[in-house]
Image (tube, helix red, strand yellow):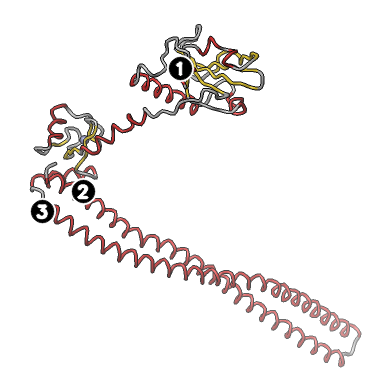
Amino acid sequence: MLPEIENLLRLQEADKEIRRLQEEIGELPKRVAVIEQKLAGTKAQLDKAQASVKADEATRRKHETTISDLRGKISKYRDQSLDVKTNDQYKALLHEIQFAEKEIAATEDKILELMLNADARDTQVKTAQAELKSETAEIEMEKAAARERTAEDEKQLAQWRARRDQMRAGVSEDLLRHYERVSKFRGSGISEVRDHKCMACQVMLRPQTYNDVRTGQQTVVCDSCQRILYFNPANEMQAIEPEQKRSRRHHPKIDAPQAWYYRQEYGDSGEVLLCLANAGAQASRRVFDMHTGRLIGDILIREGDYRHAFPEDITGAIRLNGHWTEADMETWGIEMPMTALDSLHGDLEAARHEMNAHPGKSQTPAAVPTEQAAS
Ligand SMILES: [Zn+2]
């Protein structure tokens, strides 16, 4: 790999980290602002509750004044009643007194109602005060954490910026300009090549371009996305690894109470998956369409274990890995779920791969007794 390319790779890493840190630093005040807004809401609620308490107290004082005024009136009427000359005058005064007494009783009721309300108001105030206290503590903690995080981010940012400048110094001006132009539009300016593809835009490279990248003697850019390309042999090796893993396919057990098979042809049905299972002294057989997973025909039951009950189905079939309980399969209805079908397809592919890799050793679709092949 060209040293310039190595510098560009580290530069890209630094650029990415700088962007991340800047975003994080920008996010922290927003988080604090959200809690501050909540705090303002609680404060407003507390103010409202406290204002209600004050308003109630004023109303109560007004009612008390009304009562004392009415009492004053009553005692005045009583005094006057001593001096009245006629019965009518006396009755009129008595009427006034009764009227005032009724009004006193009504006002006393209103005071009582306010006193009952006062308890609820008091709870409201106390709840809001407690909320305010915990939210204030929370915001102080959040602010402290944000300050700490920001300071740490700033420190790292300075380090990454210094590293970035160092890397930039190790790249030619033209290449750097190209890198920055592409980075600005695409978010990254350099891309790895794997399996003949640009990993950033997933476009296949022309053979000549691919060879140029692999040899690593000159800088090459992707025709499609313009990113500067590089090749890492270590990663190309990793891509091959899953192929090797395949050969370690788990082999189905010969004495399993349930066995899955693949057949290339099955009467008029073409490719099918068979599920043979033992249940007590009987064996069952289900036939599924290989591509849709739909159940073909009815479930067939015969006496004896499946090996003796369905020998014609087993001979020449490819044994597959797969096990589902009878209860599970009953829930499938007339079609097996995609997960089950995918798993069987995957295992068939692995079995075929194995057969190609070790043709002498493995089971083949030809008339080889499958029991031997599976052991
Ligand atoms: Zn590309």
Q: How many marks?
A: 3
Considering the image in quadrants, where does the N terminus appear?
top left
Q: Residue at x 21, y 40 (%)?
A: 191
Quarter residue 178 falls in: top left
User: For this view, does 28 lie left or right of residue 41?
Assistant: left
Separation of disc 1 and disc 2 at Cα? 50 Å
Q: Residue furthest top?
A: 268
* Gap between marks 3 and 2 measured at Cα: 14 Å
Between circles 1 and 2, the one closer to the viewer is 1
Q: Residue at x 59, y 13 (%)?
A: 308
Q: What kind of residue is marked 2?
A: Gln
Query: Distance between the Cα atoms at labels 1 and 3?
Result: 62 Å
Is 291 displayed left or right of 122 in the figure?
left
Label annotation for residue 309? none
Q: Position of residue 249 (x, y in %)?
A: 41, 28
Dot 1 crowding, Cα within 10 Å, few <14, some 14–19, many 20+: many
Task: Determine which quarter of the picture holds residue 326.
Answer: top right
Q: Position of residue 282 (x, y in %)?
A: 65, 18
Residue highlighted by disc 2: 12
Q: Pick the residue in front: 125 or 72.
A: 125
Q: Which residue is mark 3?
A: 169
Nearer the N terminus, badge 1 or badge 3? 3
Q: Element under label 2?
A: helix
Residue that carries the numbered disc 1 in the rendered image = 318
Q: Quadrant of ligand 1?
A: top left
Amino acid type shown at disc 3: Ala
- Name the kind of residue labelled 1 in the image: Ile
Q: Secondary structure at mark 1?
A: strand
- Please give the name of the residue rendered at 74% of the width and 82% of the height, measured from the top-left corner: 67
Between 52 and 302, the one nearer to me in the picture: 302
Q: Is residue 129 left or right of residue 57?
A: left
